[in-house]
Amino acid sequence: GENDENETIEEEDEEENNAETKEGENGVVKDGVNEQVEAENEDDSIPADENVNDLERAFEILECAHMIYSKMSEDYPTDTRIITRIADIHVMLSDICNENGDHETALTHVLKAIDLQETIHEQQRYRLLAESYYKLGLIYELINKFADAVDSFNKAIDAINQAIKHLDGEDKENEREELISLLPSIETKRNDAKASMADQHLIAQARKILTGTDNTTEAKTTDAPVKDITLNIRHKRPATETENDDDVNKKAKVE
């Protein structure tokens, strides 16, 4: 009897130990899963925070650089290198503003860059202008100003053609080919902007027709009274002629 009791106690102890071990294992696994989930959540949030911080830091650095170069330009107002750097800074600030969805400010920065690049009298200006006008066209597309986008893309194409003309010599062949290879993509963007401009015009016309403010509708409305007046005049003439005929007949009878 005592042996049976001892065996029973030992079995119960083993079961308790096994249960504790399993519980411990489950606890470890559970904690591991929780830690893994938390780590994943942290990983998900890190890129967004880093991206925002990187953009903010880049913007601050560029603004600081702009202040430094602007101060230098006061002493050397015609220095091509300084002018080019300030224009480059405006282009980069424009990229950051676009990334943040601030397209109007991005537009302002690109226009400032173009104004500066137009003052450069070296061959490099055409490539810089081509890039800036291309970026300008993209921004105009984003804010649905397709006519301005077409104009900007055309100016980018003209700038590239000017750059190609100024690349003389066999040693510049690779550079010329590189510039020529850029033209098809810009022309495609220009044609897309033209198509969007046409679509925008059709939509505007459709809205005018639906709201009754279309020019053709107004013209028809204006023509209608004139047409009615003309018809009234035409109707009166036969009536007058009939009255005259009646008078003649009456006079004939009296006679």
Image: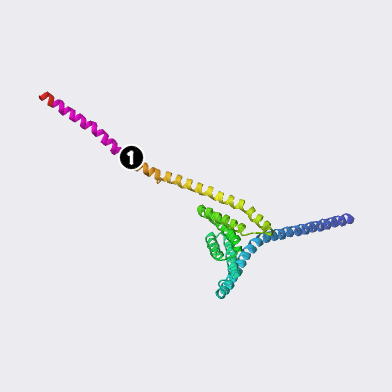
Residue depicted at x 72% and y 60%: 35
Rendered residue at 58%/55% (across/down): 157
Q: Is residue 97 magenta?
A: no
Image quadrant where residue 72 sits: bottom right
Residue 112 picture location, percent across and down: 54, 64
Q: How many marks?
A: 1
Q: Is residue 221 left or right of residue 5?
A: left
Quadrant, the C terminus: top left
The reply, left or right, for residue 236 in relation to residue 186 is left
- Say whether residue 236 is left or right of residue 149: left
Indicate the position of residue 38 as horizontal and vertical percent values: 69, 60
231 inside magenta stretch: yes
- How packed mark 1 is, by other alpha carbons closer than 10 Å (few <14, some 14-19, many 20 or more), is few
Name the outermost residue toward the bottom: 75
Query: In the rendering, at what x and y percent does residue 154 appear?
Result: 55, 54
Pick whichever, 40 or 108, lies toward us. Answer: 108
Relative to 211, is 160 above or below?
Answer: below
Q: Position of residue 96 (x, y in %)?
A: 59, 62
Quadrant of image for the N terminus? bottom right
For the stretch drawn in magenta, the main secondary structure is helix
Q: Which element type, helix, strand or loop, lies under badge 1? A: helix
| Amino acid type, callout 1 | Ala
**From which residue to which does the magenta span run?**
225-250
Residue of label 1:
224
User: Outermost residue, right direction?
Assistant: 3
Compared to residue 94, the image places residue 76 above or below, namely below
| Snapshot quadrant of residue 130 | bottom right
Q: Is 94 located above or below residue 188 in the figure?
A: below
Colour mode? rainbow
Can you name the residue that lies furthest to the left here? 255
